[in-house]
Amino acid sequence: MEFRRITSLPPYVFTIIDSLKIERRRAGQDIIDLGFGNPDLASPEIAVEKLCEAAHNTRNHRYSSSRGLPKLREAIAGYYLERFGVELDPDTEVISTIGAKEGFSHLMWTLLQPGDAALVPSPSYPIHIFGPLLAGAEIRELPMINGAEQFFDAMVDTWKYSIPKPRVIVLSFPHNPTTTCVDLDFFQRVVDFARERDVVIVHDNAYADLGFDGYRPPSILQAEGAKECAVELYSLTKSFSMAGWRMAFMLGNPQVVAALAKLKSYLDYGTFQPIQIAATVALNEARDFPAEQNAIYQVRRDALCDGLNRLGWEIEPPRGTMFAWAPIPEPYREMGSIEFAKFLVTEASVAVSPGVGFGPDGDGFVRFALIENEQRTGQAIRNLRKALTKLG
């Protein structure tokens, strides 16, 4: 039997480390998992209580709306006004999605078709690469290893010489996996570029509220003229520690929002209504929660990066995201990221994500997720000290 749409998909690299991790745990080994970016912090208590209350109301057991409840869309618009100073029309510039990955994937179906092209960072969160590919489009990968300026210069050159001209630019800052951060001036330059060329910008703002050392990630919608060409995905996954709830939004250009709404009307009836109600309460009544989570992640970042640097594994502390992007130490670099990640599981009992899982440009790196407390992170550092003997 042939499955043409998925035949070209490569094996999911992260399953290699996951399988090894499971195997070692079954053998009794205590694996400290710093690989999968799965938040371990509890969701807001007020949201949990509201979820339970709403779930007991049988009126909420019926189909909901794929656009999202009106009060939910009003709540995210209110949050954006307070957090970013961005005004949004809840009826025309906001739609809820069943998590950011669902929203992004279906948006690619809306914007792209065979024969089209998209500009995508490299390395990149996998769905940012495979979303356009699954829509039948081609991708032009732009290097992100050396920062946002390298990406911008490559974007300008690649668009100039591409046939066909790319219709979509995919962005995500703070960036996963490289943790690259940008200021509003960068977004303004990208918006100006896109407006002049009739290109749609899709910005995945997954780490909107995770900025350290005083850095506050901007929204691309703060840039002048952004709504003419850009949409942004905002998720409750990291900011409100609501990963399993699958609650996110696409915001911005009303034409793009309407197009996604039309497609989703054929595909789903929205997230379970009690979740939408609970998310509304979280956005309206737990607005201090993201800052509390951010403070915890910064402490974890410091524990990890300070510990790695003490080992001689030099790493620059990230200014944003819930990750640390670490170059493989020179004595181990020839192993490549998969073999090095396997080595860390077997010899140090520490699981990380191999950089090649985010694209070929990531093969000289591994990604740590800040998903363990300080004590477990300290144990991971002690384990690494014993295993990485070549670091002296």
Image: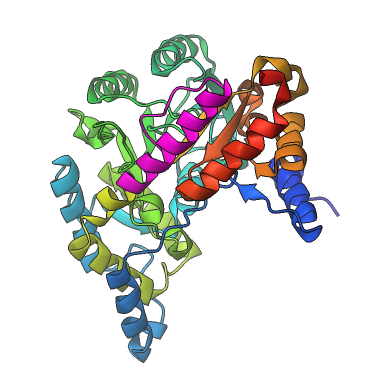
* Prevailing secondary structure of the magenta residues: helix
Residue range (magenta): 294-321
> Is residue 37 found inside the magenta-colored segment of the image?
no
Give residue 125's quadrant in the image: top right
Which residue shows up at 71% across the image and 36% down it? Answer: 344
Question: Residue sitting at 71 percent across and 16 percent down?
Answer: 331
Q: Residue at x 31, y 36 (%)?
A: 211
Quarter placement of the C terminus: top right
| Left-right relation of 85 to 239 | left
**Percent x, y of residue 317:** 42, 27
Q: Is residue 268 above or below residue 224?
A: below
- Magenta segment: does it hold 310? yes
Image spot of residue 47 (x, y percent): 31, 70
The quadrant in which residue 285 appears is: bottom left
> Looking at the picture, does residue 191 appear above or below residue 65?
above
- Decide which of 286, 71 is in the foreground and name it: 286
Figure disc tally: 0
Q: Picture coordinates of residue 218 (x, y %)? A: 25, 34
**Is any part of residue 136 visible from this angle?**
no
Horizontal arrangement in the rendering, residue 368 relative to residue 94 (left or right): right
Q: Dividing the image into 4 quarters, which one contains the N terminus? A: bottom right
Q: Where is residue 389? Give x, y as percent.
A: 72, 24
